[in-house]
Amino acid sequence: MSRRSGIPKKIDKLEPSQDDTVQPLFLTPKILQFLKELELHLFSSSI
């Protein structure tokens, strides 16, 4: 049985793949944006 659904897919996009090695500068802003949103979410939920 596969347990990969929903959340793991988001993590897969952050892991290095052939596309990531070809265009790392193209994907970096997306990763930074994801980390910003995650930090904001954690900060707002801790208040």
Image (cartoon, helix red, strand yellow):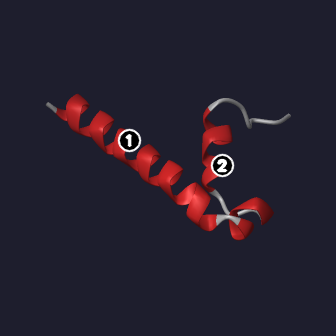
Circle nearer the N terminus (1, 2):
2
Q: Is residue 40 left or right of residue 23?
A: left
Residue 23 appears at what percent x and percent y?
A: 68, 64
Category of crowding for the residue at label 2, using alpha-carbon neighbours closer than 10 angstroms: few (below 14), some (14–19), many (at least 20): few
Q: Residue at x 37, y 39 (%)?
A: 37
Tell me: 45 left or right of 5. Answer: left
Q: Quadrant of residue 5?
A: top right
Above or below: residue 21 compared with residue 45: below
What residue do we see at 57% from left, 65% from top?
25
Q: CA distance from mark 1 to mark 2?
A: 15 Å
Residue pointed to by mark 1: 38
* Residue sitting nearer the eye, 35 or 27: 27
Give percent across and percent down for residue 28: 52, 59
Residue at the extreme left of the image, as rendered: 47
Which element is circle 2 on?
helix
Q: Pointer 1: residues within 10 angstroms few (<14), some, or many (20+)?
A: few
Describe the element under mark 1 as helix, strand or loop. helix
**Spot occupied by residue 24 in the image (x, y as percentages of width and height):** 62, 66
The residue tagged 2 is 13
Specify the amino acid type for callout 2: Lys
Q: Residue furthest right?
A: 1
Instruction: Point out residue 18 in the picture as x, y percentages from the top left corner.
Output: 79, 65
The number of numbered badges drawn on the structure is: 2
**Is 39 rendered above or below residue 41?**
below
Give the position of the C terminus as an image quadrant: top left
The amino acid type found where label 1 is placed reads Leu
Q: Are marks 1 and 2 in contact (CB under 8 Å)?
A: no
